[in-house]
Image (tube, coloured by chain):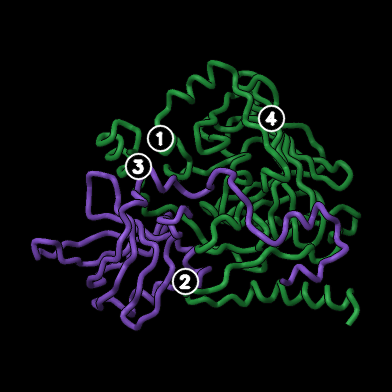
Amino acid sequence: MRHGVLLGLPLVFGLFMGGFFMAPPAVAHHTFSVEYDASKCSDMTGTLTKVDWQNPHVYFNVDLKEADSQVSSWSFEAVSVAFLKRSGIQKQDFVDNMGKVVTVRACLGKSSTGKRAAAETIKMADGRTLRVGSDYEHGQN
Amino acid sequence: MSLILVLATCTAACVSAQDQKKSGGDSSQPRLQPLPKGGPTPRTAGGHPDLSGVWFPGTTGGYDTSNPPAQRQFDPKVTPEEKPPFQPWAAAKIKSMTAVDFELGRASVNCLPRGTPLSFLGNPYPIKLVQTRDELIQLSELNSNFRVIHTDGRPHSKDPDPTFNGDATAHWDGDALVIDVIAIDERTWNNFVGWFHSDQEHVIERLTRPSRNYLIYQVTIDDPKVLAKPWTSAPRQWSLSHQDLEEYYCTNNQEVQEYESIKEKTGGSGK
């Protein structure tokens, strides 16, 4: 590992390196588990219809076919504009796939508004998978 | 190859590797790695540490959506941090809050500034510090917020009105910049689980830069109406980046209505 070349640096500094920390409270915009259910995550496939590229969260809409064959518009919450851009994701990535079939890995919302989920990843029509949220179902938020 | 040359190579390579990250959002992209120390503390002509730079919370000088824990500022096993020593009435008030109350009380959910000291203690977004001879200018990406701190040791303003950042004045104590803050708007919290404060809150922040790539933030909070005694944070690490700040205005907040709906549905527990 890279930090193997750092032999001889002060020990206290070395203790800060080479791994991520445990648990101080999350500093996220809000607490995931109060608004969304990490035990209800699944892949949802439908047609991408809209992207709202704003803060505090980017939202995008996908038309999903329900169990009764009716089509509903679902709203998916991604992280902020800055976090997406720093991950190399641009608004154009959504624009280029508007009207195309996408698959979103997302966790259901708890509010009464329904048809709302927190997105972890979105697989675009060209096969690329973009990480647009944390790995909520495995405890990252 | 000598150890010094290897370290120098690693320093340049480590920083440039983070800067050249072009993931395209690929979820298989490697996570960011902790930065090396990066060399000695940069100093101003006057001999003080130069705190200028773009700083990310944690050790990687960046943010990785697939690795939020890398943004953590300290390891409680290495530098334990006490829980806030609330007076009994304050502890009881916080205990009576539900999970949804915690969310609806958060500055971020309401698109309000996190203020002092939560803009350092609880903030995943970068901060740019610009140090001049007499000022430290803090530009926070979150909410495109700014704070200008005079570093000449002047007294506080007389009867300052409360503001989210508070009334701040600073002086150098050796290599530490000590920032004394009063008059902080009572809508700010000091954590995300109900730590409210009074109009008597007095915050003392310390900023140091032990090496090129790291900034250490530590804060002492004294609030004789809410706390039984002053509380001091663990030393919190921030790491250097070469990225520009992004604009961030809260223009599409849907959280309040969502949490109000959840409160109605669950009675506040969020379960």
* First reached walking from the N terminus: tag 1 or tag 4: 1
Vertical comparison of B212 with B250: above or below: below
- Dot 4 surroundings within 10 Å: few (below 14), some, or many (20 or more)? some
Quick check: do tags 2 and 4 share a chain?
A: yes
Coordinates of residue B176 in the picture (x, y in percent): 82, 45
- Which percent across, then down, holds residue B159? 65, 25
* Among numbered discs 1 and 3, the one appearing first in the sequence: 1
Q: Nearer the viewer, mark 2 or mark 4?
A: 2
Q: For residue B5, which numbered disc appears in the image? A: none
Residue A56 rendering spot, x and y as whole percentages: 43, 54
- Chain shaded purple: A
**First in sequence: mark 2 or mark 4?**
2
Is A51 placed above or below A112 here?
below
Query: Between tags 4 and 3, which lies in front?
Result: 4
1 or 3: mark nearer the eye: 1
Tell which circle, 3 or 2, labels the residue nearer the N-terminal end. Answer: 2
Quarter of the image where the N terminus of chain B is located: bottom right
Q: Chain of mark 3?
A: B
Say which chain is green: B
For label 3, the residue is B256
Q: Chain of mark 4?
A: B
What's the amino acid at mark 1?
A: Ala
Kindly identify the residue that appears in the image at 73 percent across and 35 percent down.
B204
- Per the rendering, the mark at residue B231 is 4
Disc 2 crowd, CA 10 A, few/some/many (<14, 14-19, 20+): some
Q: Which residue is mark 1?
A: B99
Let me know if marks 1 and 4 both belong to one chain.
yes
Residue found at x 62% / y 44%: B121
Considering depth in this image, is B40 or A109 the residue closer to the camera? A109
Residue at the location (40% across, 72% down)?
A: A91
